[in-house]
Image (cartoon, helix red, strand yellow):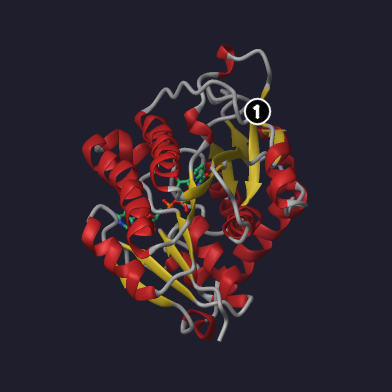
């Protein structure tokens, strides 16, 4: 019997699906806790045999007793907390956003305390930072001042504070990770999902206009999933929060990588030359010091893999032409 068991919240989501795939392929047991039963992302990247090895619990992260019971029943040794509502959903329904993103994270720490788990790994975000013109550096360090400009970022900042207080009061350690723009199969919703939508359109030979431009930290989803697992397996003392850098690149390079992967779409993938207000990129030396070498797929390769995955999935009928990723 493996001695590790991972409890993954938000496992039906984009990063969660890749976390599960990595765990299952490593032969590790995993329990998924998610309100959704829509397995389209998992089916896009995993076989039926692999999925049969996963235990699924349908549950709402906002319900304290349900979360505590699920973690206790799973006999988990590691928690990776990813369940959240992304920027557009928090904007559309702020009370629900606060319940899921803030109360949900409190519930995870509370459950860890109740069942005697001493460490939690959770997703924060680049959105905790302010606008790029508020900083002298183009690439922000972990300890750059936080000044979120949307509720999603405010909620993520609250999560970082929650983690700090659970370490201070209850000695529950945590590693919070701040991704930037995740791309790859399964990235089909959220503010920065349009570069991946462009990769899907290219795989179909279609036109696509990416909704923003400028510099971003682009992160291949499989790399980020592996970083979450690596963090969860690293014993830690304290409530650390770490940036993930990825490839800090201009959108024109993403478009060029798509055109290299699918030469037939040259000139048909365009982008709005309007950058996000967020900083151009993040700096992640502290995370590298903590975890050692990080998976770091170069942008060109990540884009090529994504397009190839979409093409194969379209051919296999795992990705109907009319559906999202
Ligand atoms: N995708 C990115 O670029 C990005 C960037 C920075 C941070 N993050 C953070 O990483 C985490 C994972 O992101 P993702 O892209 O996989 O998100 P996603 O939107 O694809 O998945 C989120 C999952 O949370 C689940 N969920 C929502 N409400 C729930 C509830 N009440 N109870 C239980 N589950 C619920 C959803 O069903 C979904 O499966 C999130 O915390 C997100 O804020 C993502």
Q: Residue at x 52, y 19 (%)?
A: 131
Left/right placement of residue 176 relative to residue 148 reads: right
One can see residue 111 in this view: yes
| Residue at image location 73% in from the left, 45% down from the top | 288
* Residue at the image position 64 percent from the left and 65 percent from the top: 309
Instruction: Pinpoint residue 11: horizontal percent, then vertical percent.
Output: 44, 63
Task: Return the x and y of residue 186 as percentages of the image width and height.
Answer: 51, 58
The quarter holding residue 139 reads top right
Figure quadrant of residue 26: bottom right
Task: Please state the horizontal and vertical placement of residue 81, each as a whole percent of the image.
Answer: 44, 55
Depth check: 190 or 170 in front? 170
The percent position of residue 17, horizontal first and vertical second, equals 50, 64
- Residue 260 higher or lower than 146, as above or below: below
Which residue is tagged 1? 141
The image quadrant of residue 314 is: bottom right
Residue occupying the point 46% across, 84% down:
52
Q: For this view, does 32 lie left or right of residue 241?
A: left
Q: Nearer the viewer, residue 302 or 24?
A: 24
Badge 1 crowding class, 10 Å Cα cut-off, few under 14, some 14 to 19, many 20 or more, is some
Q: Nearer the viewer, residue 239 or 307?
A: 239
The answer to whether mark 1 is within 8 Å of ligand 1 is: no
Q: Quadrant of the N terminus?
A: bottom right
105 on left or right of 93: right
Q: How many marks?
A: 1
Residue 59 visible in the shown view = no
Q: Circle 1 — which element?
A: loop
Question: Which residue is at the front of the view, 143 or 125?
Answer: 143
């Amino acid at each position: 019997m493996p001695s590790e068991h991972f409890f993954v919240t938000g496992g039906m989501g984009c990063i969660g699906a890749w976390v599960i795939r990595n765990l299952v392929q490593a032969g590790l047991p995993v329990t998924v806790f998610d309100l959704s039963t829509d397995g389209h992302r998992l089916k896009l990247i995993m076989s039926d045999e692999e999925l049969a090895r996963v235990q699924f619990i349908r549950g709402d992260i906002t319900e304290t007793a349900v979360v505590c019971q699920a973690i206790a029943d799973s006999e988990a040794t590691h928690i990776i907390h990813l369940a959240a509502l992304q920027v557009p959903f928090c904007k559309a329904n702020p009370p629900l956003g606060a319940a899921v993103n803030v109360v949900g994270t409190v519930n995870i720490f509370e459950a860890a305390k109740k069942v005697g788990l001493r460490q939690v790994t959770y997703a924060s975000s680049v959105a905790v930072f302010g606008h790029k013109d508020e900083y002298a550096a183009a690439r922000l360090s972990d300890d750059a001042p936080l000044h979120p400009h949307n509720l999603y970022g405010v909620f993520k900042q609250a999560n970082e504070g929650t983690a700090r207080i659970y370490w201070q009061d209850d000695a529950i350690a945590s590693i919070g990770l701040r991704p930037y723009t995740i791309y790859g199969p399964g990235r089909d919703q959220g503010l920065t999902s349009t570069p991946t939508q462009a990769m899907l359109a290219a795989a179909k030979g279609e036109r696509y206009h990416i909704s923003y431009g400028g510099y971003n930290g682009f992160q291949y989803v499989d790399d980020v999933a592996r970083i979450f697992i690596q963090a969860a397996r690293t014993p830690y003392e304290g409530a650390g929060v770490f940036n993930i850098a990825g490839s800090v690149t201009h959108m024109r390079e993403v478009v060029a990588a798509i055109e290299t992967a699918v030469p037939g779409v040259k000139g048909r993938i365009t982008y709005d030359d309007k950058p996000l207000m967020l900083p151009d990129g993040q700096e992640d030396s502290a995370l590298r010091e903590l975890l050692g070498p990080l998976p770091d797929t170069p942008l060109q390769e990540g884009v090529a893999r994504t397009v190839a995955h979409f093409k194969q999935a379209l051919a296999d009928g795992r990705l109907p032409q009319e559906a999202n990723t």
